[in-house]
Image (spheres, rainbow, N blue to C red):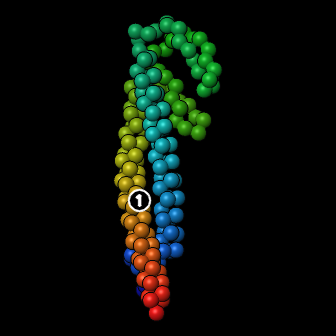
Amino acid sequence: MSGQGQPQTINVADLDAPQLLDVRRQLEEELSHLTSSFQQLKVAQAKFKACLSNVGEVNPNNAGRTILVPLTNSLYVPGKLTDTENVIVDVGTGYYVKRSRADALNHYSSKVDFIREKLDSLQETVTKKQDNLQYVVNLLVVKESELARGAGGSTAAASSS
């Protein structure tokens, strides 16, 4: 009973062609999902970098300047920059807090760093999955060529009799 709960290890080279096709399909699906997640993280990282840049623009030199204030993603209204020491920070799920510029910069910098770490980790996973997929595809080619040779050899033997 001690074997229960332990994952079973199977050598993919021992699998037949239909099983390898299933493994290939599963790896392709996983790779597609991971690639999509990678792209979404890149978009999020770009948004946080833009926030860093925007917070950097709020400084005493720009006090009293007319700026465009976003109401939605595509609707902006003109406004005057009066408080250059504090900004409103989106902390997620529709919550906003007033923070000093330095705190906002730290907040967005930590978000960018966190996402960079996740991207690096995800890139390693994607690379491993791609290597696994390539290995399975190569195995499939070998198995199919063995099947073709076996079928061709038995046909030749049958026709010579």
Q: Quadrant of residue 62?
A: top left
Q: Which residue is mark 1?
A: 129
> Tag 1: residue type?
Lys
Residue 121: % across, % down: 37, 51
Residue at (49, 14) in percent of width and height = 83
Residue 125: % across, % down: 39, 56
Residue at (52, 64) in percent of width and height = 25
Q: Is residue 151 above or below residue 100?
A: below
Residue 59: % across, % down: 41, 15
Outermost residue on the front side: it is 160
Residue at (42, 86) in percent of width and height = 2
- Mark 1 burial class by Cα count in 10 Å: few <14, some 14-19, many 20+: some
Q: Is residue 35 above or below residue 161?
A: above
Outermost residue on the bottom side: it is 161
Looking at the image, which is closer to me, 145 or 133?
145
Tell me if residue 157 can be seen: yes
Q: Secondary structure at mark 1?
A: helix
